[in-house]
Amino acid sequence: MSIFRKKKNLKKFKNYIKILIKLILRKPFTFYLEILNFLKDYRSIKKNISKSNFEIYPSHPYLFDKDDKGLKLEYFHFQDLWAFKTLSKNSIFELVDIGSNLSFITFASSVSKIKCLDIRPHKIYLENVDFIIGDINKLPFNDNSVNNLSSLSVIEHIGLGRYGDNIDIFGMEKSVKEFERVLKKNGNLIVSFPVGSKNIIEFNAHRICNLEYIDQLFENYILKNEAFIYRSKYNSREEFKKSGEPDCVACFHFIKK
């Protein structure tokens, strides 16, 4: 094993120990029960391993996945599907994406050639995707030069420091202005971010915007389509209002005026 790999494994082990300590402090009784169950299950499967085609090695235990239904991030799947369908329905074959998650980029690359800009480097090769390191508020594109732009669950974080960016109370607004600068007239803008009944910053996680502010923020765009994701489904604006405007994630397809 190389020195580099040893150092990398040591770093992963230290991070794992930190996570374990947090779990012990947060749920000590549950933690110890899960450890006992893990050891029991490991002994059981190891006893029968010779009957299978596999070898077995003890890894660090994933103790709480059985209770994790993934509901906190389920909106990612809905927004990615919605955005992918928007690309397909509107015959968008070239796209500039700003910071969206890689699952969307991966599937979108099957229908579009993508320039993907992010503050963080992505060490992955995807056909039809060029990865660029850059700043959302200083996009490396000329004025009125981009036909189609997407940014899913990104702009609500800008300026809050969560991903290493500088603190800027107007980070979200500046991002939208930068989109407007680089998009051509009649260009497509596909975005998603949290919405609710009030404008709130949940520091340092994200912002939540109300409908009135969204209309103001995107006043130089025409709304073509939208969806509000909650209760494990897509909802209309009318349904969103009737439900009391709950905190959720909304997807918007705008056309620049």
Image (cartoon, helix red, strand yellow):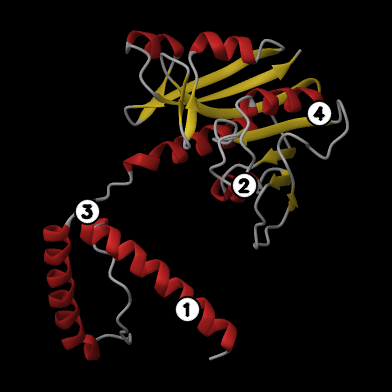
Indicate the amino acid at tag 4: Val
Residue bearing the label numbered 1 = 9
- Which dot marks residue 105? 2
Between label 2 and label 3, give the one nearer the viewer.
3
**Disc 2 and disc 4: Cα gap in Å?**
20 Å
Indicate the amino acid at tag 3: Arg
Between label 2 and label 4, give the one nearer the viewer.
4
**Disc 1 and disc 4: Cα gap in Å?**
43 Å
Indicate the amino acid at tag 2: Ile
Dot 3: element? helix
Between label 2 and label 1, give the one nearer the viewer.
1
Q: Is 214 on the left-hand or right-hand side of 120?
A: left
User: At x 18% / y 55%, what residue is drawn?
Assistant: 27
**Disc 2 and disc 3: Cα gap in Å?**
36 Å
Label 1: how many residues lie within 10 Å, few (<14), some (14-19) or many (20+)?
few
User: At x 57% / y 23%, what residue is drawn?
Assistant: 252
Closer to the chain start, of discs 3 and 4, is: 3
Residue bearing the label numbered 3 = 26
- Which dot marks residue 182? 4
Closer to the chain start, of discs 3 and 1, is: 1
Q: Quadrant of residue 92?
A: top right
Between label 3 and label 1, give the one nearer the viewer.
3
- Estimate the x, y position of residue 160 in percent, counting from the top left: 56, 35
Dot 1: element? helix
Q: Is 39 on the left-hand or right-hand side of 217?
A: left
Closer to the chain start, of discs 2 and 1, is: 1
- Estimate the x, y position of residue 182 in percent, counting from the top left: 81, 28
